[in-house]
Amino acid sequence: MFKQIQAIKGTQDVLPPYGDTFRTLENLLLSIARNYGYSEIRTPVFEHTELFSRGVGDTTDVVQKEMYTFDDKGGRSITLRPEGTAGVVRAFLEHGLFNEPMPQKLSYITSCYRYEKPQTGRYREFHQFGVECFGASGPAVDAELIALGAAVFRTLGLDEVRLEVNSIGCPECRPNYHNALKEYFAARRNDLCPTCLDRFERNPLRILDCKSPVCSRIAKEAPIGLDFLCTDCGEHFDGLKANLNVLNIDYSVNPRIVRGLDYYTKTVFEFITDTIGAQGTVCGGGRYDGLLTQLGGNPLPALGFGMGLERLELVLQASGKKPPLPEPCALYLVPIGDAALQKASVICEKLRGKGIHTQFDIVGRSVKAQMKYAGKIGARYTVVLGEDDLNAGTVTLKRMADGDKQTVGLECLAEEFYDIICTIN
Ligand code: HAM
């Protein structure tokens, strides 16, 4: 016997029926985004490593410790995307989407790869629903983006997810804040971890989201960015709060949110829950007005968020709420004999052509076993199709929920059933 091969640590197989649940959830998320004007974009799973070291920032944990980077056969350094934004910005610039009418609103469902220590809600391969909006600078857009995130949780009935917002300033005011952080950390330098010693020199803001227990204890007392905002950033943050109030979106200001990626400016926010353990940030995002220039484009304001699908699924499970389920089998045909089997396949094809989920037995089970199977898959109606029914030209349509029966002409079964199901739905 050969040894069986197992999945790689930190990756997950999605088995039925959860594959359908995830797809239905993804469709729902993309359709909510569509209501806000977002169109789907797809980018490659791997990119030049430089995109992430320049875009995400080479002092971040993601770039320093977590990327899946390798040389391809042509000797190029390649990285599996650790997040969605950098690839979308690259594609936006490469294909000249900045020439299109603004704002450009893009959404995606994407797999991401980070070499992190796996635990509940933290995986090495995970999936993000993300949105990115280009070419809009006012705080009303930040509020609209956050409203889109809130709409997801509202639609799913997840009122245990709370919103926290902050502003981390811009290149104008950030240097003052950096100086204050440097002064604070200089006095505690000997206690910082080796990575944070490097961050101390290059980007002290990053020390604030170091996961080492000592650094995070020290960071708790560090100066907060809100005290250093320039007038423009202060007004933007006030505008955001006012717009959230108008939209009736509950939030709290958490001055400790800095996010783990370097590209953010001004608004940052997170949707958080306490119901799924330590990895409670279900969605995070913010404004990144400097990223396009950093990646070689002309200046253009932009903002977005990423929502972890596995974490969203965990919140749904913890809340006891049923995730959206795909339509169950509407009609299950139970053929007896070869002629009935052929007829059943024709009726099924007709109904499937009209977009109705229809099945018939394809493994030659007994009638009893077929009916049991129909019950198991939650079929809403069944029809037994025997030789007598074929001769009579009529069949009995059975509603599984209450056993109600009605006689329908065989030749018009597909059309009549279509009308019945449309009336119910
Ligand atoms: P992020 O905070 O790194 O931001 O990730 C966004 C979300 O992805 C997190 O809130 C979490 O739900 C999920 N996530 C992150 N890491 C893992 C993991 N190892 N396992 C499972 N889920 C995870 C970004 O990625 C930014 N690109 C978001 C953004 C878009 N900002 C602006 N536009």
Image (tube, rainbow, N blue to C red):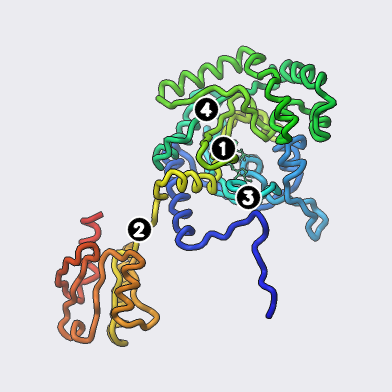
Residue depth check, mark 3 versus mark 2: number of the one nearer the observer: 3
Q: Tag on residue 142?
A: 4
Q: Tag on residue 281?
A: 1
Q: Tag on residue 123?
A: 3
Q: Quadrant of residue 237?
A: top right
Marks 2 and 4 sit apart, C-alpha to C-alpha, by: 35 Å
Q: Secondary structure at mark 4?
A: helix
> Seen in the image, is 408 located left or right of residue 303?
left
User: Which residue shows up at 46% across the image and 48% down it?
Assistant: 317
Marks 1 and 4 sit apart, C-alpha to C-alpha, by: 19 Å
Q: Which of the marked residues, 3 or 2, is nearer the chain's N terminus?
A: 3
Marks 1 and 3 in Cβ contact (< 8 Å)? no
Residue 191: x and y, percent? 81, 27
Neighbor class of circle 1 (other Cα within 10 Å; few <14, some 14-19, many 20+) is many
Amino acid under label 2?
Glu
Q: Which of the marked residues, 3 or 4, is nearer the chain's N terminus?
A: 3
Question: In the rendered image, which residue does mark 2 sit on?
Answer: 327
In this rendering, the answer to whether 78 lies above or below 245 is below
